[in-house]
Amino acid sequence: MPTTAEEIIVLDGVYKIFGPQPRGRAFDLLRSGMSKDEVQAETGHVVGLDDVSFSVRRGEVFVVMGLSGSGKSTAMRTVNKLIDITAGSISVAGTDVQALAGTELQAFRRTHMGMVFQHFALFPHRNVIDNVGYGLKVQGVARDERDAASMRALSLVGLGPYAYNRPAELSGGMQQRVGLARALASDPEILLMDEAFSALDPLIRRQMQDEMMEIQSELQKTILFITHDLNEALRIGDRVCIMKDGAVVQVGTPTEILTEPATGYVAEFVQDVDQGRVILVSEVMLPPAPVTARSTLEAALAKIGDRAGAFVVDERGAPVAVLTAADAVRAAGEGATDVGAALRTDFATCSCDNSLNEVYALAGKGLPIAACDDSGALAGNLDPRLIMEEMGRVESLAEQFEREVYM
């Protein structure tokens, strides 16, 4: 999504300390540089958030990821003021949400936010459509109007035919879809999803991720998503925030998190991730350097340099043939002087948006792969060696951080 999108949720220097005197000695010690564990040992107070700052752009899926005790769920609960903060500020759609209280806070939540919980929290005695429309009922929306909104939401999650079933008659994955439909029914601009898929079996969980991304492509909601699963975070997030001990460790795109970990903690996390699933061709390919069929082999070889080869393109810029360095050397050794004597057409093409996993098999031929834009024009060269070098580089990052620690 565009990096210039409006920031709709902004946390700035947010602290949360649990205990009888959160703004006392515990707060002073934390700000002086003491760790979460040290503050608790000294004061008995528990640090939930330690100077947390991040922003969520309109229409993006922003994932906050961390292990138990990292502060991820606490951070999300400050956004709708389920938790009061100790210090800092939180702006949601231009409103200081922490300054709201009572009916004003309730109205703001109903108008701007929908929430999906880890546990489905459905009323067992109500049918599906009444569960989905419950929030609208609380708002005083008439029955016909809320049923229509509920059916629209159920259709989005593929549960229209189950509107009059009871929750007990649905599978776990279907019950979670009801929870998502309930959050969508009031058409909020922001969705807060707290470990929404964590209770599901792996296969159903992946299906729910797919469905959420499909719905998001249509609705373009602003989604703040909490998870402890890095694979889930990298799969669904436009950007990912990694937290540890109540503090933000790194914020970045999935590719940035994977290929440019800021600390050894992040590097240790990402070393077990399938990098090829996240890294895109556009981030590895070389700029196009096409040759012409009228060139001499000597000139073409000079242009190829240390690449595996170069492409010949037509008048539209689309690749039509490839000259590999090996074929050029072989043809020159046989006395040929023109590029045409060494061209081949059995090369593969791919999209710049393909992942490295998607093009891995294509690299098996050992030939350069033509990365093309949406019009079919050559946008870059993907040498097979680049795929292996990039994946090997990422795998070595954790070891590099570990060496730096012990040197």
Image (cartoon, rainbow, N blue to C red):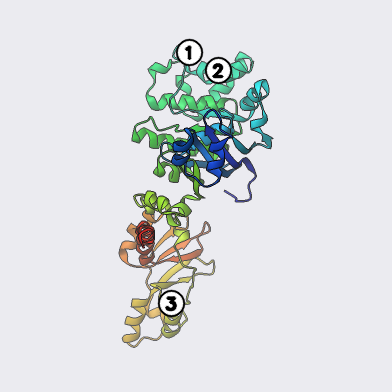
Q: Residue at x 47, y 60 (%)?
A: 283
Quarter residue 244 falls in: top left
Identify which residue, 29 or 152, lies in the foreground.
29
Q: Is residue 144 left or right of residue 389?
A: right
The C terminus: image quadrant:
bottom left
Residue named by callout 1:
126
Secondary-structure class at tag 3: helix
Mark 2, residues whose alpha carbon is within 10 Å: few (<14), some, or many (≥20)? many
Give the number of the disc on residue 134: 2
Q: CA distance from mark 3 to mark 2?
A: 65 Å
Q: Is residue 223 visible?
A: no
As shown in the figure, which amino acid type bears the numbered disc 1? Arg
Residue 334: where, in percent of width, then height?
A: 31, 86
Secondary-structure class at tag 1: loop
| 106 up-or-down from 70: above or below | above
| 395 up-or-down from 44: above or below | below
Residue 374: where, in percent of width, then height?
A: 52, 56
| 148 up-or-down from 307: above or below | above
Residue named by callout 3:
304
